[in-house]
Amino acid sequence: MPTDITLHMPPPNEKQKLALLEKHRYVGYGGARGGGKSWFVRWKATLLALKFRGIKILITRKTYRELLNNHIVPLLSMLRGIAVYNKSDKCFTFANGSTIWFGYCANDGDLGQYQGAEYDVWFADEAGQFLESWIVAIDACIRGANDFPKRTYFTLNPGGPSHGYFKRLFIDRRYTEEEYAEDYAFIQALVSDNVALMKSQPNYKRSLEKLPPKIREAWLHGSWDVYEGQFFEDFYDRPEHYEDRQWTHVIEPFEIPEGWKIFRSFDWGYNKPFSCGWWAMDYDGVAYRILELYGCTKTPNEGVKWTPPQVFAEIHRIETEHRWLRGRKITGIADPAIWDAETGESIADVAAKHQVFFQPGDHKRIPGWMQMHYRFAFDENGLPMLYVFRNCKAFIRTIPLLQYDDHKPEDLDTDGEDHVADEVRYFCMSRPIKPAHAKIADQYSKTPMAMFLDIPKEDIKSVIRRPGLEIIE
Ligand SMILES: Nc1ncnc2c1ncn2[C@@H]1O[C@H](COP(=O)(O)OP(=O)(O)OP(=O)(O)O)[C@@H](O)[C@H]1O
Ligand SMILES: [Mg+2]
């Protein structure tokens, strides 16, 4: 005897109600953390499956693990006795023939899953984590000669590789000739709109409030404009504080104590500027950029520029003659690309001939920029973990000019003069620190910060291992 099964739907909050009632071809939902987006995806997919016999629904996330945690596992308990799950097909089948399929996409190769497939409705959960090209390719599968609604729901947080694409469609509402404004609707949901979460876990909102300013603006207030303009807004050059070294990164030079460690960081520019920075590190792990050499490398058609032997001869000269460097052990860190030897001798080989030695730096970009931000952060007394001597003109000139990239929101625009920044990044990655505020650090390890930054969580953890402002070696 079959028994009746009742599916209890908890009451949706006001924003979820609006999203549940939406009928546009493209619906953007969310725009901040914890607004109840994944909950909406699960319930809307189920309601559509129950309403339209035989409808085909697709739910995507970047990885299978995310699908499992956010959707498959919760739906297994929600749909017990209502739909049957087939693990190998990754599909729930309802008694009325409706299906909910799960797909992931973490690289171009994963798009093969969608070739030739047809779905009526697509829920792209955390769609900002997909590349625009993947979104266009999968959206082409939303078709079929039937009367079912054809719809795509994007749930979104600011950030991720397609931040700019979604900002254009749903926030700025600027459309190409192939796109129609009337097809697009956006419903913003903030964590404060998620009544259920605010009641059950009031600390969650507080945890968002403790994040660094830019990420807080994006995740808590749903701001889409945070990744625009100056990349290093946290770098300050305040001449009135050069002497007291508070609330400024640029300071008056001073004599380097004997016991401090010395480093050299290097970025080679092929037909572009090269940048070399010398650093002293005090016993508390505070880094001081003390000297630099910045110049343009030789190009075939231009006048007097530096050749690799000239660059390293000059570095060697400075290291043997300058009183801050003479006779000291210097640890060199460089872009790993200088070991490439496609055209015969590598740049690293040329350097070695001049007794200038390097170890390959870690060139992961976003963790590297985060390390620079962590070092720029002032403590409560206005003291940062990175200072720049007033004589380091290339740093002081180029760092404030760098802009956010339009396409990769957490990265900087590489069209800018970024050679000093790159070389500073290699140095900072060689001596990673954790963020200035212990509470924020704890928060990082608990929130899916790694996902937002599009890097493995382990990479974040590796720089946030210990309390206090210790150097992790
Ligand atoms: N209407 C509701 N009734 C009961 N619980 C809800 C409701 N909406 C959301 N929740 C719960 O609130 C929590 C956060 O919701 P959800 O995971 O859907 O948010 P999200 O916007 O997807 O978050 P994130 O940005 O972290 O992905 C979850 O535990 C979810 O089950
Ligand atoms: Mg979610």
Image (cartoon, helix red, strand yellow):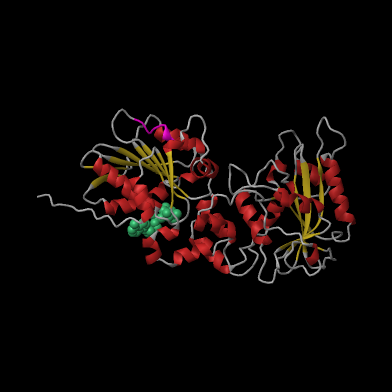
Indicate whether 28 appears above or below 116: below
The majority secondary structure of the magenta stretch comes to: loop
Residue 264: quarter of image: bottom right
Side of 83 relative to 354 (left or right): left
Q: Residue 292: image x %, image y %?
A: 81, 53
Side of 432 relative to 72 (left or right): right
Residue 139 lies in the magenta stretch: yes
Q: Residue 366: image x %, image y %?
A: 61, 51
Quadrant occupied by the C terminus? bottom right
Query: Viewer-proximal residue, 447 or 264?
Result: 447
Work out whether residue 358 can be spotted: no
Direction front: furthest residue? 182
Query: Viewer-proximal residue, 153 or 459?
Result: 153
Direction left: furthest residue? 1
Q: Residue 189: image x %, image y %?
A: 43, 53
Query: Viewer-proximal residue, 99 or 87?
Result: 99
> Residue at 36% across / 49% down in the picture?
18
Q: Residue 122: image x %, image y %?
A: 37, 40
Direction right: furthest residue? 321
Residue 27: quarter of image: top left
Q: Find the magenta span and give its range.
A: 138-143
Side of 110 relative to 404 (left or right): left
Side of 386 relative to 320 (left or right): left
Work out whether residue 180 can be spotted: yes
Residue 16 lies in the magenta stretch: no
> Residue at 25% across / 36% down in the picture?
54
Direction top: furthest residue? 145
> Residue at 15% across / 52% down in the picture?
4
The quadrant where ligand 1 appears is: bottom left
